[in-house]
Amino acid sequence: MTELDDQAFDFYAHHWDPRAPGEADLRAAAIEELPVRCPVTKSDAYGGFWMVSSYDAVLGIFRDWQSFSNNPVRAFFGRPAERPPMPPIDLDRPVQREYRQLLDPMFTPKRLAPFEPGIRALVTELIDEFIEDGRCDFAGQFALQFPGRMLYKFLFGIDDSDVMRVKRWTELSLDDPHGPIGQDAQVKWNDWLYQLIESRRAAPRRDDIIDRLLCGQIEGRPLTDREIVGCLQVLILGGLGTTADVLLNTIIRLCAGRELQEYLRAHPERIEIDEFVRMDTPVGVATRLCTRQAVIEGQTVEPGDRVLVFSAAAHRDPKEFSDPNTLKLGRSPNRHLGFGAGPHRCLGSNVARLNFRIAMEEILSRMTDLRITPGDAPRREEPQALTFSIKYLPLSFTPGPRRGASG
Amino acid sequence: VIRARVDPDRCQGHLRCLGVAPGVFAADESGHALVEVDPVPPDLEDAARIAADNCPEMAIILTEA
C-alpha cells in the first residue's frame, strides 16, 4: 500500500476536491487511511462540506433520510444543476417511496430472469467481434457497449436500429455535459425520449417500465411527461458507467491475479459482484444535504450543511471489514454499500448482478489467459466526482472461434 | 430450532439473502425479502446465518427457539 505523507493526508482531510484532476492514485491510498485516521472531516473546497468515511456513519446517513436529504444535491460541486431533478433519486420520502413502489416491481429477479437468454446473446455477439483476434480494447468494444445496449433493448424494448444512435447521445451528454457537443446530444436525447413516451402512450400496453410510468400515479395524479423522462434518464444513467466500471475493474484484477482468474474460470458458480464492488466501488461517493441537526461520529452537523458520503472509503474500514484492503472472494460478512442503503438503495442492483454474472461467465469461458496487452496500459479519464471511468483497456487472450448465429 | 423474520421497515430489497439462502428467503412482488420457510430447516441454518450477517440493512432477525 502507498502511504500518504502528511501533506497528502492534510489535503484529503481538509481540502479535498473530489473533482480535482490527477488524484486517482492519491485517492487509492486515501480510502485506506481515512476511515481510521479521520472518519469525519470538513473540506474547505466548494464552500465547505463534511466528508464521512467510517462504515457506521456512512450507513447511518444513508438510512437517516429524515436528517439527510437527496434534494437538492446537484449543485454540490459549485456548478448549477446540469438537468432538472430526476425522480426518484433527487427526491425524498414520502414522494420518493411512491416512485419506488411503481418501479421496484419491474426490477425483481423474477421479472428480469426472462431477459437472460437475450442478454447472453448480446454478450456473445460482442465477444464474437474480437474473439478471433486474441486482443481487444475491452472498454470500447465491450464494457462501454454492453450496459447501454442491454438497458435500451431489454428494459425499454427499443429496436436495435435506434439503440446505437440513442446510446451515442447518452454517452455524449455524459462525457461533455457543459460543452456544445454534449448539450446538443442532450437536446436530441431529450426530444427522442419525449417522442418515445408519446408513441408509447398511444400504443397497446406492454406491462413494462414505460407502461408503469405512463399508467401510474404519484400523489394521486398521473406523472407528467417531464417526470417520466426524468425517471427514464436516471434509470439509464444509473446503469451505464456503473456496470462498465465494475466489469473493467474486475477484469484488471483478474489480469493482475492470475490464480483468481483461473479459480473463477474453473468455478463459475463462485462469480459474485459483491466483493469486486466493495474493492473498486463504482459509485464511491454520494451527496446529501443536512436538514436537521445531527451528530456524526461526535461532530454536530447543522441544517444546510452539505455532506459527502465516501462509501469507497467506508469499504476499507477495518472496524467493519477484516483485512479490508485485500480482495477475498466470498468474503462474509460483506455488508458493502456499493449499491447504497436505505430508501435510495440502487434500483438496478438486480440488473447489475445479472449483467455481471452473464458477462463474466462468457468472458471467462471464452477468453482464456486474459492479460493486459504487454507494452500497453489502461487509460482512466479524469475523476468525475461519482465514478472512476476507464476508457481504454487493452486486453490480450488466447484467440477462439465465433459463436453467434451471424458468426 | 431457528426462526427467521425479515423486518419490513428495514428491508430495502438488496436481496443479498436470496443469493445466499434461496431456500429460506424469497422476494415478494416488489422485490423485498420475505421468509419462505419458518422455522429454518436444519440443513439451511448456516445459510440463514450467513444471509443475516450479510444484510446491509440488518433486516434479518434470527431467533433460537
Image (spheres, helix red, strand yellow):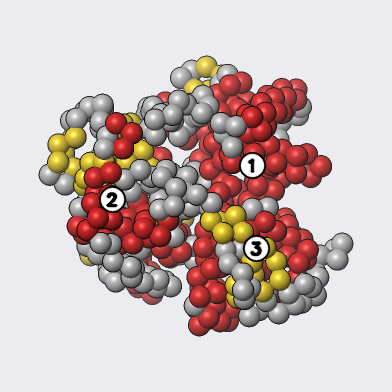
- As drawn, the label of residue A281 is none
Q: Are marks 3 and 1 on the same chain?
A: yes
Residue B60 rendering spot, x and y as whole percentages: 31, 55
Please report, as a chain letter, where disc 1 is located: A
Kind of element beneath mark 3:
helix
Q: Are marks 3 and 2 in contact (CB under 8 Å)?
A: no
In this rendering, does residue A209 appear at all? no
Please report, as a chain letter, where disc 2 is located: A
Q: Disc 1 to disc 2, how far (Cα)?
A: 30 Å
Count neighbours of disc 2 (C-alpha within 10 A) and say few if under 14, some if 14 to 19, many if 20 or more: many
Which residue position holds label 2? A12
Q: Residue at x 80, y 69 (%)?
A: A403
Foreground of the two, A73 or A320: A73
Residue B65 rendering spot, x and y as whole percentages: 22, 64
Asked whether, in this view, residue A75 is left or right of residue A32, the answer is right
Residue type beneath disc 3: Phe
- As drawn, the label of residue A171 is 1
Q: Residue at x 36, y 72 (%)?
A: A326
Q: Residue at x 66, y 33 (%)?
A: A181
* The quarter of the displayed image where residue A336 is located: bottom left
Locate the N terminus of chain B by quadrant: bottom left
Residue A372 rendering spot, x and y as whole percentages: 60, 72
Residue A270 rendering spot, x and y as whole percentages: 51, 73
Q: Is residue A150 above or below residue A367?
A: above
In this rendering, does residue A217 appear at all? yes
Residue type beneath disc 1: Glu
Foreground of the two, A264 or A171: A171
Kind of element beneath mark 2:
helix
Q: If you read the primary sequence from the N terminus, does the residue marked by circle 3 or circle 1 appear first?
A: 3
Count neighbours of disc 1 (C-alpha within 10 A) and say few if under 14, some if 14 to 19, many if 20 or more: some
